[in-house]
Image (tube, grey):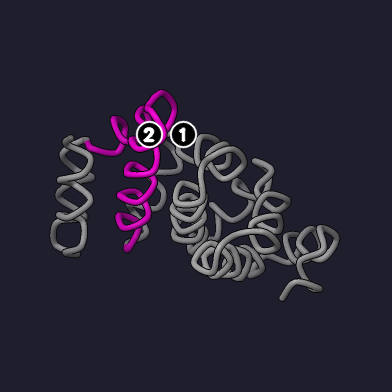
Amino acid sequence: MAALALSNLVMSSDNQVAIARAGAVEPLVQLLRTGDAEGKTVAAGTLSNLPDNNDNQVAIARAGAVEPLVQLLRSGDAEGKTRAALALSSLARNLDNQVAIAHAGVVDPLVQLLCTGDTEGKIMAAQALSSLAENDDNQVAIAHAGAVEQL
């Protein structure tokens, strides 16, 4: 599977830019939308490692990754939810993405993962909520969703 090979290659920051410029973002987002459980998890994991720079963060969000990542966070298996939370956390390092991610309905499933996930899932959920909380409006939504009690 090409996505699995990319997941190893994105570990190098030099490769991240090259992978995004080569057009890999759109097929990864498509795999998030239409793949099987394993494919979605691999795509989310790969996308979580691409946004180490602002251009990739914007490109991934513009390619439509946020909604399928939120869907994976809602309905995936434990590994899929963890990888989706990690990818959303990475994308939320961009201030513009923070608002779009929150508007996609991510806060409640992140709080749910924080409550019921395995250890890694809880860590990734907390990390994503932390990134989203850089925005004042998101802070209110996160508090109203019950995250404070879980943290």
Task: Check the image and report above or below for 26 versus 92.
Answer: above
Up-down relation of residue 123 to residue 26 (above or below): below
> Is residue 35 found left or right of 16 in the rendered image?
right
Residue drawn 70% across and 58% down? Answer: 111
Say which residue appears at 63% left-offset and 65% top-offset. Answer: 129
Q: Check whether the beta carbons of the residues at disc 2 and disc 1 lie within 8 A of each other.
A: yes
Left/right of residue 62 with respect to residue 133 in the rendered view: left
Q: Which mark is residue 64?
A: 1
Residue furthest top in the image: 34
* Residue segment shown in magenta: 24-52
> Closest to the observer: 42 or 99?
42
The answer to whether 67 appears left or right of 54 in the picture is right
**Amino acid under disc 2:** Val
Percent across and percent down for residue 75 are: 59, 38
Numbered tag placed on residue 29 in the rendering: 2
Location of residue 98 (image quadrant): bottom right
Distance from Cα at disc 2 to Cα at disc 1: 7 Å
What percent of the width, then of the height, locates residue 51? 35, 57
Q: Which mark is residue 33?
A: none
Q: Amino acid at mark 1?
A: Gly
Pick the front one: 39 or 57 = 39
> Residue 77, percent across and down?
51, 44
Q: Residue 31 colored magenta?
A: yes
Of labels 2 and 1, earlier in sequence is 2
95 inside magenta stretch: no
Q: Quadrant of the C terminus?
A: bottom right
At 54% from the left and 52% from the top, the residue drawn is 97
Figure check: 30 above or below 20: above
Which quadrant of the view contains residue 116?
bottom right
